[in-house]
Protein backbone atom coordinates (compact mmCIF):
# COMPACT_ATOMS: atom_id res chain seq x y z
CA UNK A 1 0.00 0.00 0.00
CA UNK A 2 2.86 2.41 0.84
CA UNK A 3 4.37 1.74 -2.60
CA UNK A 4 1.07 2.52 -4.29
CA UNK A 5 0.72 5.79 -2.36
CA UNK A 6 4.32 6.79 -3.13
CA UNK A 7 3.85 6.02 -6.84
CA UNK A 8 0.63 8.08 -6.96
CA UNK A 9 2.31 10.99 -5.18
CA UNK A 10 5.30 10.84 -7.55
CA UNK A 11 3.04 10.64 -10.59
CA UNK A 12 0.93 13.55 -9.35
CA UNK A 13 4.02 15.70 -8.68
CA UNK A 14 5.43 14.88 -12.12
CA UNK A 15 2.15 15.71 -13.81
CA UNK A 16 1.76 18.92 -11.80
CA UNK A 17 5.26 20.00 -12.89
CA UNK A 18 4.27 19.42 -16.52
CA UNK A 19 1.10 21.46 -16.05
CA UNK A 20 3.14 24.25 -14.49
CA UNK A 21 5.37 24.31 -17.58
CA UNK A 22 2.31 24.38 -19.85
CA UNK A 23 0.92 27.32 -17.89
CA UNK A 24 4.22 29.14 -18.20
CA UNK A 25 3.96 28.88 -21.98
CA UNK A 26 0.20 29.38 -22.28
CA UNK A 27 -0.87 32.04 -19.76
CA UNK A 28 -4.53 32.04 -18.83
CA UNK A 29 -6.71 34.35 -16.77
CA UNK A 30 -7.15 33.34 -13.10
CA UNK A 31 -10.18 31.22 -12.30
CA UNK A 32 -12.29 30.71 -9.21
CA UNK A 33 -10.96 28.42 -6.43
CA UNK A 34 -11.39 24.67 -6.79
CA UNK A 35 -14.78 23.36 -5.78
CA UNK A 36 -15.61 19.98 -4.28
CA UNK A 37 -18.39 17.73 -5.48
CA UNK A 38 -19.33 14.12 -4.86
CA UNK A 39 -19.69 12.05 -8.06
CA UNK A 40 -23.25 11.71 -9.34
CA UNK A 41 -24.89 10.04 -12.29
CA UNK A 42 -23.68 11.38 -15.69
CA UNK A 43 -25.62 14.38 -17.00
CA UNK A 44 -26.11 15.61 -20.54
CA UNK A 45 -23.61 18.15 -21.84
CA UNK A 46 -24.66 21.70 -21.07
CA UNK A 47 -23.52 23.99 -23.88
CA UNK A 48 -24.44 27.07 -21.85
CA UNK A 49 -21.76 26.15 -19.32
CA UNK A 50 -19.04 26.38 -21.97
CA UNK A 51 -16.96 29.51 -21.74
CA UNK A 52 -13.54 30.87 -22.50
CA UNK A 53 -12.11 29.81 -19.12
CA UNK A 54 -10.29 26.73 -17.88
CA UNK A 55 -12.24 24.14 -15.89
CA UNK A 56 -11.08 22.52 -12.68
CA UNK A 57 -12.60 19.94 -10.39
CA UNK A 58 -11.54 18.10 -7.27
CA UNK A 59 -13.07 14.98 -5.76
CA UNK A 60 -12.52 14.29 -2.05
CA UNK A 61 -10.49 11.11 -1.55
CA UNK A 62 -12.74 9.18 0.82
CA UNK A 63 -14.54 5.83 0.71
CA UNK A 64 -12.60 4.95 -2.47
CA UNK A 65 -14.07 7.92 -4.32
CA UNK A 66 -11.90 9.17 -7.23
CA UNK A 67 -9.76 12.26 -7.02
CA UNK A 68 -8.63 14.31 -9.97
CA UNK A 69 -8.14 17.57 -11.79
CA UNK A 70 -9.49 18.96 -15.06
CA UNK A 71 -7.71 22.01 -16.45
CA UNK A 72 -8.67 23.02 -19.98
CA UNK A 73 -10.69 25.49 -22.03
CA UNK A 74 -14.29 24.31 -22.39
CA UNK A 75 -14.79 26.25 -25.61
CA UNK A 76 -11.81 24.61 -27.32
CA UNK A 77 -11.42 21.12 -25.87
CA UNK A 78 -13.68 18.13 -25.13
CA UNK A 79 -12.09 14.82 -24.00
CA UNK A 80 -15.28 12.75 -23.63
CA UNK A 81 -15.14 9.55 -25.71
CA UNK A 82 -14.09 5.90 -25.88
CA UNK A 83 -10.43 5.37 -26.78
CA UNK A 84 -9.41 2.26 -28.72
CA UNK A 85 -5.83 1.12 -29.45
CA UNK A 86 -4.85 1.51 -33.10
CA UNK A 87 -2.62 -1.56 -33.01
CA UNK A 88 -2.85 -4.96 -31.34
CA UNK A 89 -1.69 -4.72 -27.74
CA UNK A 90 0.99 -7.08 -26.36
CA UNK A 91 -0.23 -10.38 -24.94
CA UNK A 92 0.15 -9.01 -21.41
CA UNK A 93 -2.70 -6.60 -22.26
CA UNK A 94 -4.82 -9.01 -24.32
CA UNK A 95 -7.78 -8.46 -22.00
CA UNK A 96 -7.86 -4.66 -22.52
CA UNK A 97 -10.49 -3.40 -24.96
CA UNK A 98 -10.53 0.38 -24.54
CA UNK A 99 -10.62 3.16 -21.99
CA UNK A 100 -13.39 5.69 -21.62
CA UNK A 101 -13.50 9.30 -20.43
CA UNK A 102 -16.73 11.09 -19.58
CA UNK A 103 -16.82 14.74 -18.56
CA UNK A 104 -20.02 16.62 -17.72
CA UNK A 105 -20.64 20.34 -17.23
CA UNK A 106 -23.81 21.05 -15.27
CA UNK A 107 -25.00 24.24 -13.54
CA UNK A 108 -21.55 25.79 -13.70
CA UNK A 109 -19.80 22.75 -12.22
CA UNK A 110 -17.65 20.19 -14.02
CA UNK A 111 -16.71 16.63 -13.12
CA UNK A 112 -15.31 13.60 -14.89
CA UNK A 113 -14.83 9.85 -14.73
CA UNK A 114 -12.71 7.29 -16.56
CA UNK A 115 -12.51 3.51 -16.73
CA UNK A 116 -10.67 0.70 -18.54
CA UNK A 117 -12.81 -2.02 -20.15
CA UNK A 118 -11.41 -5.55 -19.97
CA UNK A 119 -12.71 -8.90 -21.20
CA UNK A 120 -11.80 -12.40 -20.05
CA UNK A 121 -13.80 -15.06 -21.86
CA UNK A 122 -17.36 -13.77 -21.87
CA UNK A 123 -16.88 -11.70 -18.73
CA UNK A 124 -16.57 -7.94 -19.11
CA UNK A 125 -15.16 -5.74 -16.38
CA UNK A 126 -14.78 -1.98 -16.02
CA UNK A 127 -11.90 -0.76 -13.85
CA UNK A 128 -12.82 2.76 -12.70
CA UNK A 129 -10.13 5.41 -12.27
CA UNK A 130 -9.25 6.33 -8.70
CA UNK A 131 -7.08 9.20 -9.94
CA UNK A 132 -7.65 11.29 -13.09
CA UNK A 133 -5.81 14.29 -14.53
CA UNK A 134 -6.66 15.97 -17.84
CA UNK A 135 -5.34 19.10 -19.56
CA UNK A 136 -5.48 20.07 -23.23
CA UNK A 137 -2.13 18.36 -23.72
CA UNK A 138 -1.95 15.51 -21.22
CA UNK A 139 -4.01 12.74 -19.64
CA UNK A 140 -3.12 10.56 -16.68
CA UNK A 141 -5.18 8.06 -14.72
CA UNK A 142 -4.79 5.12 -12.33
CA UNK A 143 -7.55 2.54 -11.93
CA UNK A 144 -8.69 0.55 -8.95
CA UNK A 145 -7.24 -2.97 -8.62
CA UNK A 146 -9.37 -5.94 -9.64
CA UNK A 147 -10.81 -7.74 -6.64
CA UNK A 148 -9.94 -11.19 -8.00
CA UNK A 149 -6.48 -10.88 -9.54
CA UNK A 150 -5.22 -7.60 -8.07
CA UNK A 151 -4.36 -6.06 -11.46
CA UNK A 152 -4.75 -2.32 -11.99
CA UNK A 153 -3.97 -0.07 -14.96
CA UNK A 154 -2.18 3.24 -15.38
CA UNK A 155 -2.01 5.45 -18.46
CA UNK A 156 0.01 8.59 -19.08
CA UNK A 157 -0.29 10.14 -22.51
CA UNK A 158 -0.34 13.25 -24.68
CA UNK A 159 -3.30 14.49 -26.71
CA UNK A 160 -2.43 14.99 -30.36
CA UNK A 161 -5.63 16.94 -31.10
CA UNK A 162 -8.96 17.90 -29.61
CA UNK A 163 -10.74 14.52 -29.32
CA UNK A 164 -14.07 16.08 -30.29
CA UNK A 165 -12.65 17.10 -33.68
CA UNK A 166 -11.25 13.60 -34.33
CA UNK A 167 -14.29 11.57 -33.23
CA UNK A 168 -14.64 8.37 -35.34
CA UNK A 169 -11.89 9.56 -37.71
CA UNK A 170 -9.71 6.49 -37.23
CA UNK A 171 -6.69 8.69 -36.58
CA UNK A 172 -4.54 8.74 -33.44
CA UNK A 173 -5.76 11.32 -30.96
CA UNK A 174 -3.69 10.36 -27.91
CA UNK A 175 -0.49 8.40 -27.42
CA UNK A 176 1.39 7.34 -24.35
CA UNK A 177 2.38 4.53 -22.00
CA UNK A 178 -0.12 1.98 -20.74
CA UNK A 179 1.01 0.11 -17.62
CA UNK A 180 -0.33 -2.93 -15.79
CA UNK A 181 0.38 -3.15 -12.08
CA UNK A 182 -0.11 -5.58 -9.23
CA UNK A 183 0.40 -4.78 -5.56
CA UNK A 184 1.85 -1.42 -6.59
CA UNK A 185 4.50 -2.94 -8.90
CA UNK A 186 4.57 -2.59 -12.68
CA UNK A 187 4.33 -6.01 -14.31
CA UNK A 188 3.94 -4.87 -17.94
CA UNK A 189 3.87 -1.68 -19.98
CA UNK A 190 3.70 -0.66 -23.63
CA UNK A 191 3.67 2.40 -25.87
CA UNK A 192 0.35 2.76 -27.65
CA UNK A 193 -1.71 5.22 -29.71
CA UNK A 194 -5.50 5.47 -29.41
CA UNK A 195 -8.28 6.64 -31.68
CA UNK A 196 -11.50 8.02 -30.18
CA UNK A 197 -15.03 6.79 -30.89
CA UNK A 198 -18.52 7.71 -29.84
CA UNK A 199 -20.33 4.61 -28.55
CA UNK A 200 -23.55 6.36 -27.59
CA UNK A 201 -25.51 5.90 -24.38
Image: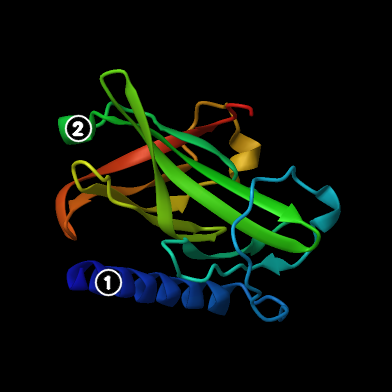
User: In this view of the protein, which residue sits in the foreground, 161 or 105?
Assistant: 105
Check the image and name the residue furthest to the right: 48
Name the residue rendered at 68%, 51% in the picture.
Answer: 104
Residue 5, disc: 1
Which of the 4 image quarters holds residue 110? bottom right
Q: Residues within 10 Å of mark 2 (few under 14, many from 20)?
A: some
Task: Tell me what residue is drawn at x 63 percent, y 53 percent.
Answer: 40
Instruction: Check residue 136 in the rendering and tell me which mark sits there, or answer none.
Output: none
Say which residue label 2 marks. 90
Q: Position of residue 107 (x, y in %)?
A: 81, 59
**Which of the image's four quarters has the N terminus?**
bottom left
From the viewer's side, name the closer residue of 164 and 145: 145
Q: Nearer the viewer, mark 1 or mark 2?
A: 1
Q: Is residue 155 visible?
A: yes
In this rendering, position of residue 198 left or right of residue 84: right
- From the top left corner, tell me how far across and down residue 100 is, in percent: 49, 40
Amino acid sequence: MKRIILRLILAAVTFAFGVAIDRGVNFRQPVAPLTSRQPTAPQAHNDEAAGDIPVRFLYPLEARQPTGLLDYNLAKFEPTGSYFPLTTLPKEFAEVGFFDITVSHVDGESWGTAYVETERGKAHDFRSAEFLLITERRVFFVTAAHEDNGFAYRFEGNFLANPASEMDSGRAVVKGTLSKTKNGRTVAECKVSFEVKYLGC
